[in-house]
Amino acid sequence: MSEEAPPEELTAKQRLALPAHTMPLADAEERIHTFDEVPTGYTLAMARAEARRCLQCKKPHCIGGCPVGIDIPTFLRQVDEGDIAGAAKTIRETNFLPAVCGRVCPQDKQCQALCTVGAKHTPVGIGSIERFVADYERERGLDRTPEMAPDTGKKVAIVGAGPAGLTGAYELRRRGHAVTVFEAFHRGGGVMVYGIPRFRLPLEIIDSDLAFLESMGVQFAYNILIGKTLTLDDLFADGFDAILIATGAGLPKMLDIPGSNLNGIYSANEYLTRVYLMHANEFPAHPTPIYQGKKLGVVGAGNTSMDVLRTGKRLGAEVTCYYRRSRAEAPARSEELEHAEQEFIDFKWLSNPVEFIGGDDGFVKAIKCMRMELSEPDESGRRRPVATGETFIDPVDTVVMSLGCNVNPILSQSDDDIFTNKWGIVMVDKETCHTSKAGVFAAGDSITGGSTVILAMGQAKKAAARMHEYLSGTFDYVLDVPDDPEAPGMQWSFRTRKTGKKSATQA
Ligand SMILES: Cc1cc2nc3c(=O)[nH]c(=O)nc-3n(C[C@H](O)[C@H](O)[C@H](O)COP(=O)(O)OP(=O)(O)OC[C@H]3O[C@@H](n4cnc5c(N)ncnc54)[C@H](O)[C@@H]3O)c2cc1C
Ligand code: SF4
């Protein structure tokens, strides 16, 4: 159904001459006092006007940049024609979480980076249009139920309710399998709920996706830590025919410098979890507290750091970011960095924390940093920071370390058959996502050590397709493991008869 009359045909030259429509942002002075979403969204007219800029390329490079292969030109044409419901259907064919992806995907590095228009002009705003379409679908309650296969009688357990687990649940349920998602926390969503802030991803979007999965018949079992409450073998004994591990990478890395154990020092993971999962900022209305300081220092300048900095600002703190390299080397996406800068956050570049100084009460009072300078590029291609010998001390009453995460070993340590590499990453056959234990597959951050929502979803889709083959009896699997797979430097591999490939090696 078209919202309006179809637009007149334009030549490629005319399309290239159309102005780009960037999504409007809430005013920085006002938005730092709320957790409301910062980009305010397209109107229908803006979405259609932006979609008009698409050239409908014969070879659409944008699709190659999308880890789940959305048919981008088709949905853009449908938006251009005013057929928003049709566009929603097109996106849903390959992407189960479009309202999430339209908001948090790094489109500037994926589909939009490859858009032909971007060679000389601003690329088409694919992500913003995807967000508009998904919101339109949700707000109008359009039917999003996929074609469902009849029940197969097979039972699947999914461990973890983040984007990988939820995508696996969707893909396996629609193929007719009974699906139960086991989640350690009291609610689903994974990092989409307890990491990514509300001002980037409102909770109602995740809740709507969880409710939709429930309406498809997916069961959720909360407050169950697989590896402690139940083991993988318990699940098999309970009648599950296959298992998908989708436990993410939630074990924070911390700086090992003097004072690291002082009170008032958090990992980014704990800080964000307290605020967004436990609503600690609303203590005592909610039972979990957070130490809400007046001067917050954040160590690191990646995307997660930007989320912590901007969260701290909204909690009323004066916020400073400490990073040992310069702005040019900061790993955060430029858009995230710009949004943080707009929000009056202080950045101390070339500042390497060397000590946290505490008071008699055991709480952190100050941060001591070494001033750095840049020398030659290191193996990562970024210029190496070297100490100048000059230090400075800043007063702080809260510190958040945002230095990345590792895979939590709780599950793999509870089962000797699940092989991990030296960083705890669950080893899988890259073609099939099958682990070293028969009938157990894995996807998402647990097999990469940390990436993005859409990559986690892409892997879960691949794993679900192979799990379906496994459950249907057409997946033929052979494990090739040496006698001592844990031996230092040991190379080990496993393969399927189907692909014949050996694709996992122990580093
Ligand atoms: C602060 C932050 C911001 C981010 N921002 C972005 C962004 O803007 N865009 C983007 O694309 N990506 C972003 N990411 C990365 C992205 O969120 C992850 O790559 C993605 O969530 C991984 O999905 P997953 O399903 O593998 O794991 P997770 O989302 O981590 O979900 C894993 C789930 O498994 C549960 N679990 C763990 N162990 C067990 C167990 N033993 N038993 C039962 N349940 C268990 C966990 O509680 C969790 O709910 C961000 C990450 C962080 C930390
Ligand atoms: S590459 Fe850009 S212009 Fe071409 S089809 Fe994709 S979105 Fe449209």
Image: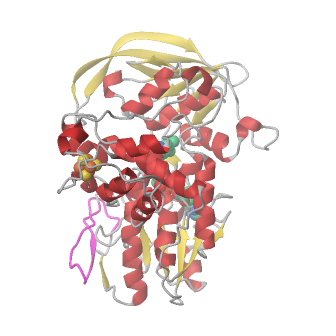
Q: Residue at x 63, y 35 (%)?
A: 35
- In this view of the protein, can residue 230 be seen by the observer? no
Residue sitting at x 68%, y 58%:
186
When asked about the image quadrant of residue 272, the answer is top right
- Left or right of residue 51: residue 367: right
Residue placed most toward the observer, 186 or 358: 186
Question: Residue 340: x, y in percent?
Answer: 49, 26
Q: Residue furthest right?
A: 285
> Is 41 placed above or below 449 here?
above
Q: Residue at x 47, y 48 (%)?
A: 131
Relative image position of residue 376 (x, y in whole percent):
20, 23
Give yes or no for residue 244 being in the magenta stretch: no
Spot occupied by residue 143 in the image (x, y as percentages of width and height): 55, 67
Report the residue at 22% width, 36% height from top: 379
- The kind of secondary structure the magenta stretch mainly shows is loop
Q: In the rendered view, does 128 fall on the left or right side of 313?
A: left
Closest to the observer: 503 or 31? 31
Which residues lie in the magenta part? 485-506
